[in-house]
Amino acid sequence: MSKSDLNKKLKEQLAEINKSLKTKFTFADEEELVTKRISTGLFNFDQVLGGGFPRKSVTLLYGNESSGKTYVALHAIANAQKEGLTCGFIDAEFSYDPVWAEKIGVDNSNLFIIQPETGEAALDATLALCKGEVDLVIVDSIAALLPTKEFDGTMEDNSIGTQARLMNQFFRKHGPVNKSTALVMINQVRSGIGSYYVSDALPAGKGQQFFSRIIVHCKRGKPIQEKGNTMPQGFQMHFTCKKNKTAPPLGECDVPFYYSGLVDKDTMVFQLGVDAGLVERRGAYYTYGDIRGLGRENFIESVKEQGVMDNLIQQVQGVVSNE
């Protein structure tokens, strides 16, 4: 049987099955099955993710406090809004600061936001945004989701497992509902109980680790200090992709975070240049073309002073796009 005849026969079988069972079988080469992404606006982080947050999927960001989780999510919203995409924010922690978000670049007048009392309300709102095909939705955070049973009860009531059951039910409902939304869920970490070897545990059960297509560990790195200033200006956010079902896993990157909320793209481009071999490193010295500098800050400053930063950016973007 030729390939065309086989394809014709399969189409007839598919149509018959869908008609008799009222199902929605398709072929695996359908365009809608191809993973589409939303860029975070951070070159390094996008490369680790595989191009950005995947649509129709859950991306989990977790880590200790002040490690850059919410900042990255807000930066992704700002970048998505610049591209004309719709965004939503589920503020379960009741900590959204519109002034800080605006510094990052978020357009508050075009952002759906809710501060739900209970976890059920938060997750119903999330499903509603997914059903409405909002492009990017952030849930901050899973650990803050409060089950109704816990909300209505007293502090003495035993509520073990209610949050995990709530999340597992949500994930089961999320798949059929989400047609095009990139869902990013932020979680905190807790100390593991009952085992000496368990260092970090994620609140709300194991379900989130199985249902998430991408899991990223966020960690606070080295402080950023400028010459002549004894106080740190920010720190390096270190991201490790623990799980990735859309691209190679275990990728790592550093993204500079400044307390002003601004992004230093020059530093990100520099790091990508080093990773791609465009910038040569020997000990503490860096070389790009005829430019050679001692230390990262001195080298980046020399590249900017000699007006070749745009060339480096173009080369880096070319390397990233070909990967």
Image (cartoon, helix red, strand yellow):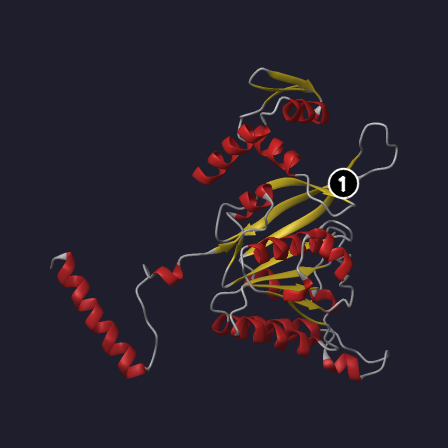
Say which quarter of the image contains residue 258: top right
In-image side of 45 versus 4 (left or right): right
Location of residue 38 with respect to 248 vertically, above or below: below
- Of 182 and 108, the residue lying toward us: 108
Q: Is residue 200 visible?
A: no
Location of residue 312 with respect to 221 vertically, above or below: above
Q: Amino acid at mark 1?
A: Phe
Give the residue displayed 46% in from the left and 56% down from the top: 36
Q: Is residue 230 visible?
A: yes
- Of 171 and 85, the residue lying toward us: 85
In-image side of 180 versus 82 (left or right): left
Estimate the x, y position of residue 52 in percent, counting from the top left. Answer: 54, 51
Would you name the residue on which mark 1 appears? 235
Estimate the x, y position of residue 293 in percent, counting from the top left. Answer: 67, 18
Location of residue 188 with respect to 306 vertically, above or below: below
Say which quarter of the image contains residue 183: bottom right
Estimate the x, y position of residue 209 in percent, counting from the top left. Answer: 60, 60
Quadrant of the snapshot with the N terminus:
bottom left
Estimate the x, y position of residue 227 in percent, counting from the top left. Answer: 82, 27
**Disc 1 packing (10 Å; few <14; some 14–19; many ≥20):** many
Give the residue displayed 52% in from the left and 74% down from the top: 131
Quadrant of the snapshot with the C terminus:
top left
Q: How many marks?
A: 1
Give the residue displayed 56% in from the left and 46% down from the top: 46
Give the residue displayed 61% in from the left and 72% down from the top: 126
Q: Residue furthest left?
A: 1
Location of residue 281 with respect to 180 vertically, above or below: above
Q: Tag 1, which secondary structure?
A: strand
In-image side of 231 versus 173 (left or right): right
